[in-house]
Amino acid sequence: MRPPRVQRSRLKYPLDAVLGSAAHIRLMRVILHDVGGPVSVTDAARMAGLSTTGARKALEVLARLGVVVRVGTGRAQKYDMPEDGVFVSLLTQLFEKEQRQYEDLLSSLREAVAMPEVRSAWLGEVADHDQRVLEIDALVETKALGWIGPELRTRIVPTEKRFDIIVEVNTYTRADAPEMPADAVLLWGTSEGAGSDRPLGVQTHAASVERSWKMAQVIADMMKSDPSLARRALHYTNMLLREGQGTANSDLGEWRQLLETYSGDRLRDLLVSRSSRADRLRRSSPFFAVLTAEERDRVLEEIDGSR
């Protein structure tokens, strides 16, 4: 996209510069919403999907505009949100609204595919990022294959109208279902067995507790270098509580309180604690669900390698 032919004053129209590029918006989302605190250029670039050089240039512009501030010096320098920034509160509300809209979309899709005949359904990555088209793959019972496709289409029409999108639905039986991608969003059921012939196995309670503890150790270590993990977990927990999780609401409510009040060090200590309370909370931990595909692979590789 070409820059505007006529340039305008940044004093009169500062939002032209603040919101003038995707890089600016991505970096503001990281600092104001995803992390909510100081972050290095390298970490901001990684979380925003930008090059380090591009992120540094964009952050310098945002700092001059007063949207972010530099903290520290030299290699320890980070960028944070200013305490009295003119647009910080409004921008933060915009990012919250953006996330809430996406969560509402997922909730609507989950309600549409929640049928006894659907064993699992997932949302794949959008192939064309400029188009408002989503694709759902659903693993269904063989006896329902003849009629469930049109039924799902009918159930999804209200979501298409509400969000002004197109949703394509593909139905499969276990015999021909594709492998669920690592970065897919699970809408209904479980990821186990979708397009896979791996044995599910049965874990004893003791083995399950040990595995969740090892997973928590890896996640606690990741939190040291990725300050967005706790905020991602809090956003996800809030979404689950808004949807309502029945008997799980109690533990999720406890997680929300911890994520809102505990420091990073205290959260990491809780994650790796051997107390009965920590064992109970790890069973409903929101952290694994918010990991990227690469982060999940790292967690699973380290767990398997520690056996």
Image (tube, rainbow, N blue to C red):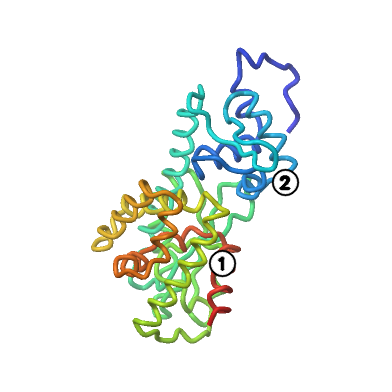
Q: Is disc 2 placed on a helix, strand or loop?
A: loop
Indicate left or right for 218 with 18 as reference: left
- Dividing the picture into quarters, in which one does residue 26 lie? top right
The x, y position of residue 236, in whole percent, is 41, 53
The x, y position of residue 60, in whole percent, is 68, 31
**Disc 1 or 2, which lies upstream in sequence?**
2
Q: How many marks on residues? A: 2
Dot label at residue 100:
none
- Dividing the picture into quarters, in which one does residue 284 lie? bottom left
Dot label at residue 182:
1
Q: Residues within 10 Å of mark 2 (few under 14, many from 20)?
A: some
When the figure is inspected, residue 262 is found, relative to residue 60, above or below; the finding is below
Q: Name the amino acid type tagged 2.
A: Ser
Depth order, front residue of 46/9: 46
Residue occupying the point 68% across, 34% down: 58
**CB atoms at circles 1 and 2 under 8 Å apart?**
no
Q: Name the amino acid type tagged 1.
A: Ala
The residue identified by callout 2 is 51
Depth order, front residue of 43/286: 43
Q: Is disc 1 placed on a helix, strand or loop?
A: loop
Q: CA distance from mark 1 to mark 2?
A: 24 Å
